[in-house]
Amino acid sequence: MGLNKKSVDDFNASGRRVLVRCDFNVPLKEGKITDETRIVAALPTINKLIADGAKVILCSHLGKVKNGPNEGESLAPVAARLSEKLGKEVKFVADYNVTGEAATAAVAEMKEGDVVLLQNTRFRGKEETKPEEAGEAFAKELADLADDYVCDAFGSAHRAHASVAVVTKYITEKGGTNAVGYLMQKEIQFLGNAVEDPVRPFVAILGGAKVADKLNVINNLLEKCDTLIIGGGMAYTFLKAKGYEIGTSLLDDSKVDYCKEMLEKADALGKKLLLPVDTVVTEAFPDPIDAEIATWTVDSDKIPADRMGMDIGPKTIELYSEAVAAAKTVVWNGPMGVFENPILAKGTKAVAAALAETEATTIIGGGDSAAAVNQLGYGDKMSHISTGGGASLEFLEGKELPGVAAADDK
């Protein structure tokens, strides 16, 4: 899938006010940023615009903001960290209205190469409403601050939010350019090539808890890949579909027939669909989640009625690792077990290690898989780690992402 969209390289930003939607939804603990991956990922686009002499106005959401604005979800710590990374002051507009008088005044004072960061877009309250009512007034006010717009927030690109997609309408009305940033380009290049034009064999690995979350991804990837590997909690619904006893393991009863269909589809298409051949089981779910716990390893068709599957076993690890070793392209989304528990993380660790060792193009589809790879120290061994879990999943489903669609065509 070629990205036939204007990028930051396709317009002259010199002297112009450029609104950049970033993804600064970083984890905070007691006001301190604990993982700056998303900030670092935004730097190439910001630095390019500074070098071009633009007046750079940054915006992003942070957190879920359920009960109105609060200082715990302010972007102030992001402004401080960005200032360090860019080696220049990033002026933070703390106004909870986001686009109010303080923002207007700060933008009016900007000189070429200056950077301003607006307050958390979700403080406004109209940011994430449904597309047909997506804070039109808010989107227009954001556009009023700028001449051009750049979307570089892949993690939010699957949302038709005011600051992601709706703002482009008002930028177009005033004759400005709507472009994508370098991070968006990179995400779509890697994910797009993997799905539409992969170097084969192409192996897709899907894990995580629920089949329901990945219905369309399973269906779409079966048509594109050569081998589909299933792990995590969703594997047990597939094992149930094969007629196996799965004990007290996670089961999505309403999706058993769907799993049967997918097994039949794989056969009809001549694709390999690999399921766990052995399983690590426990008597109950660990409580707390990282508690020490007794485990047994059994064949996947012999799970005792009173036991719960929690991770893939050693024979499955070998099977999955061999499939990865033979691949030329691998996409991975979702852990193989309850990886938050060290005892139940062996499968996820082994898959991450197999990806780190292969010569294949390796793409990690955000979320828990990205966290696992980074925690295990394999981040620099992967070809690409997506910054957007939900967005990468929707992309792998074959859906159009609003944040991409809204950018101007070349």
Image (cartoon, helix red, strand yellow):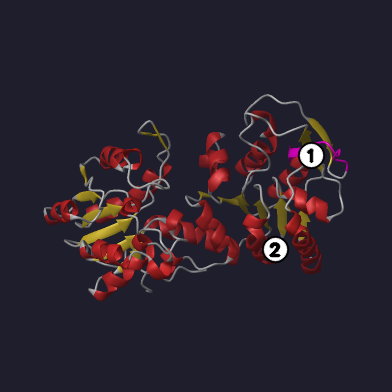
Q: Please state the horizontal and vertical placement of residue 209, each as a whole percent of the image.
A: 66, 47
Q: Residue at x 38, y 44 (%)?
A: 40
Q: Is residue 306 magenta?
A: yes
Range of the magenta residues? Answer: 302-313
For label 1, the SS is: strand
Residue type at tag 1:
Thr
Q: Which residue is mark 2?
A: 222
Dots 2, 1 in contact, CB < 8 A? no
Instruction: Judge whether residue 286 can be spotted in this image.
Output: yes
Q: Quadrant of residue 76?
A: top left
Q: Is residue 290 left or right of residue 30?
A: right
For label 2, the SS is: helix
Query: Which badge, 2 or 1, comes first in the chain's sequence?
Result: 2
Q: Which residue is mark 1?
A: 279
43 up-or-down from 5: above or below: above
Q: Is residue 256 magenta?
A: no
Q: Residues within 10 Å of mark 2 (few under 14, many from 20)?
A: many
Q: Quadrant of residue 161?
A: bottom left
Instruction: Judge whether residue 111 can be spotted in this image.
Output: no
Q: Residue at x 28, y 73 (%)?
A: 172
Q: Please state the horizontal and vertical placement of residue 302, each as a whole percent of the image.
A: 88, 41
Q: Is residue 312 left or right of residue 117?
A: right
Residue type at tag 2:
Leu
